[in-house]
Amino acid sequence: MLFKPAFLGLLATANFVHGAAIAHAEEQTSLEKRAAAADRLVFCHFMIGIVGNRNSPSQYDDDMRRAKAAGIDAFALNIGVDGYTDAQLDLAYKSAADNDMKVFISFDFNWFKTGEAATVGQKIAKYAGQAAQLKVDNRVFASSFAGDGLDVAAMKSAAGVDVFFVPNFHPEQTANPASIDGGFNWMAWPNDGNNKAPKPGSSISVEDGDNKYLSWLGTKPYMAPISPWFFTHFGPEVSFSKNWVFPGGALIFDRWKEILDKGFPLVEMITWNDYGESHHFGPLKSPHYDDGNSKWTNDLPHNGWLELSKPFIAAYKAKEKSVDKYISGDQIIYWYRRTLKGLDCDATDTTAGRPANNDSGNYFMGRPDGWESMDDVVYVATLLKEAGTLTVNSGGQSVEKEVPAGANLIQVPAVVGSQTFSLSRNGKVVLQDKSLMDISNICPCGLYNFNPYVGTVPAGESDPLQPDGLASLTIGLHVSTCQATPSLGTNPPVSTTGGSPSSTTGTSPPPSTTAGPTSTTGTVPSQSSSLPGPTSTGSSQPCNGGTNADVTDTVLLVRASALRMEHLEILPREMEGTDVLRMAWVMDTKGCVASLVVMATAPTLHVNTVDNALR
Ligand SMILES: *[C@@H]1O[C@H](CO)[C@@H](O)[C@H](O)[C@H]1NC(C)=O
């Protein structure tokens, strides 16, 4: 009898020493427990339709590991009827198993037909026995996007296994939810009841949607949506033209708090990788092909939103209403659009004044439908162990706020210019950084782009789109200055002396384009107005007319180098002057000219103007 307590004591010591392994085991136990009870599970919607270019399980590994590390229990693998679907499911299930992650299939009824119950059931059966298949209540979990009218009994019969089916059926379309095991609400954004942004007189909150589903489902589990944003801008360059926003703003922060408060049994994050609708939590560098979304996703990583979600996910699983004790260290997460909503891009936008297929009813010309519902605000979420003083400088306008410990959201008016963030305590700066993305009054790639830049302090890793993800960037653009390359560079800034100008992937600092000392750390000096610009000769080629180049300082550093390396003529002129170290004209293949100015005081490169060709 004496042996037992001693043995337990030894175990306790071992637990302490091998804390990480034990915590991992507990996490697994806890997933088993939560899955058995169909309570407090967190999923994330993953689009298989955009990753048809993957060819090994390892290409899923990073997604699986990142999602798992954030606390996501399983990916909802959204599938259509593409030829590569099963091949990709095979790879995803394998990678998930390799990484101790779970997955399940989510049938997209944009592509499946509701008469295809047998096909759906057979597909569930095909993957039901895989190690990574999520089981809830010890049954094979499956979900959908839309699909009201599917014969669920026939589907289950064709599956031949016990299916736990939580589809995105709708209370308006399926009067009685008796055939389903739970319900998934897709409407993660405030809306007008007609799949567009709220309008005066028709405004439906996400919570209104929760309540409708909850009363419809009764005791069956409700799968609640959470999404940070929605902006899509496909023009006539593709067949699936669509152009609208839902108000994003503070949504992700408010919604996580609401989810903790309400304690819904199931949550699905929308999405991991639907770049085309700008609601991805996953990285830009996650391998995918470009359906045209890179026009508005390039240089706009969202990883900070996954960071922000981590403590909320942990609190949710623990059935806590407060996130506070799951904050592991001081962190600032910020997001804002790179242009203000009033900026006029009609002259160069892909949709403005340009009709396109509107069978979906989702196509609008010019500013995206719903743009008025967006605010010109810099959103700053603070995750703090202790209270501090937050200082946000947006375009030279500084705002200081006392912020308590825990999770808080501060909203600051967005102003054109650089964006800096700092946290101090007792007069001492503890966190500080300048965003890689300025707010600009130039239409990026000539477009209305309402997708936000999301950054963190301390800065995260760089996250460039890969070549496959950039392949369609220039198709259909009406400016010639926009290149299919990432151009953010790294954060924190790195000295670029002697750097090779060949890499533009963003994993290296922007290449040097000057003979002098170069650094991207300095504050950018204001442009000199006395510099001579190129004169327009009325070329027939469409350049940017000086108004619509997509230009930030970092973009330019990369671009100027790329232009010079690839096909361009550079005509350096040494300038006498207080601040100008070197000035150059750069001409692209269409004869469009940019004047690039290297400033001496804070050596960096500027575009001074972009104009028609010197000919
Ligand atoms: C597309 O259809 C929707 C819905 O009918 C309509 O509101 C919108 O104005 C249409 N877009 C264009 C460009 O005509």
Image (tube, helix red, strand yellow):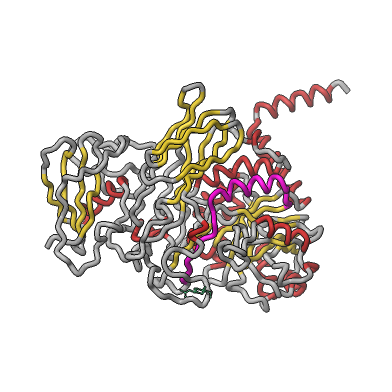
* Residue 347 image-quadrant placement: bottom left
Horizontal relation, residue 100 to residue 166: left or right: left
From the viewer's perspective, is residue 303 above or below residue 247? Answer: above
x, y percent for residue 269: 61, 54
Task: Confirm whether the magenta stretch covers residue 245.
Answer: yes
From the viewer's perspective, is residue 427 above or below residue 294? Answer: above
Q: Which residue is outermost to the right? A: 1
* Residue 527 image-quadrant placement: top left
**Residue at screen point 33% across, 42% down:** 509
x, y percent for residue 466: 40, 55
**Residue at screen point 31% across, 51% down:** 551
Q: How many marks?
A: 0
x, y percent for residue 238: 42, 71
Quarter of the picture containing the N terminus is top right
| Residues drawn in magenta | 241-265
- Looking at the image, which is closer to me, 196 or 164? 196
Q: Is residue 613 visible?
A: yes
Q: Is residue 93 visible?
A: no
Task: Confirm whether the magenta stretch covers residue 165.
Answer: no
* Residue 417 image-quadrant placement: top left
Horizontal relation, residue 473 to residue 23: left or right: left
- Looking at the image, which is closer to me, 117 or 114? 114
Quarter of the picture containing the C terminus is bottom left
x, y percent for residue 249: 53, 50
Horizontal relation, residue 293 to residue 612: left or right: right
**Residue at screen point 38% across, 71% down:** 353
